[in-house]
Amino acid sequence: MMDEQQLIEKLRLIERLHAGAATDGEREAAANAKERIRERLRKAGESDPPVEYQFSLGDPWSRMLMSALLRRYDLKPFRYRRQRRSTIMVRVPGSFVDNTLWPEFQKLNRTLQDYLAEVTERVISEGINGDSSEIDVFAEGGRQLPG
């Protein structure tokens, strides 16, 4: 079971890897990683003008992560009136989304989701009931299905 500090370090490592750290010294400098990614974004904006992107993220943790990631790189997440809360809009160069933002988000989000699942399972098991196995599946009419 990973603790919160280990999770934070793992998230920072993912960012450093997406920043393209080339040396051991660079890999150890999270602030440099953020600046390298911001520089990549600036360069992408020179040849690839920003366009409007829409992300639909169903759970609050993914939305919070995406918003924080966008703000980290000085991008402004927003949504239009009457859009669902699950929608995050941003104006950003497409090449930055394809090559940096989305791959980084996916790895960060998977790491965070795995951690939250572990914590949830542990808390439910210790606080409610130790059996957190999947529920039985029955066919219509009440006959249990195999597997």
Image: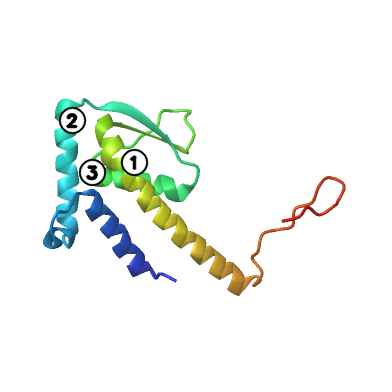
Q: CA distance from mark 3 to mark 1?
A: 13 Å
Q: Which residue occupies the foreground of this view, 63 or 10?
A: 10
The amino acid type found where label 2 is placed reads: Gly
**47, above or below 138, in the image:** above
- Asked if marks 2 and 1 touch (Cβ < 8 Å), the reply is no
Upstream in the sequence, badge 2 or badge 1?
2
At x 42%, y 45%, the residue is: 63
Horizontal side of residue 39 vs 128, given as left or right: left
Q: Rate crowding at label 2 as few (under 14), some (14 to 19) or many (20 or more) other CA atoms within 10 Å.
A: some
Q: Quick one: quadrant of the N terminus?
A: bottom left
In the image, what residue occupies the spot 14% across and 54% down?
22
Label 3 secondary element: loop
Mark 3 or mark 1, which is nearer to you?
A: 1
Can you name the residue that lies furthest to the right here? 141
- Residue type of the residue flagged with mark 3: Tyr
Q: Which residue is mark 1?
A: 102
Q: Residue at the location (18% across, 43% down)?
A: 38
Q: How many marks?
A: 3
- Label 2 residue SS: helix
Q: In the drawing, does residue 63 fall left or right of residue 50?
A: right
- N-terminal of the pair, mark 3 or mark 2, is 2
At x 46%, y 59%, the residue is: 114
Q: Which residue is mark 2?
A: 45
Residue 67 in sight here: no
Question: What is the C-alpha distance between the residues marked 2 and 1?
Answer: 16 Å
Q: Amino acid at mark 1?
A: Trp
Rounded to the nearest angstrom, the CA distance separating label 3 from label 2 is 13 Å
Which circle marks residue 143 in the picture?
none
Q: Quadrant of the C terminus?
A: bottom right
Return the residue at label 3: 73
Q: Relative to residue 78, is residue 63 depicted above or below?
A: below
Label 1 neighbour load within 10 Å: few <14, some 14-19, many 20+:
some
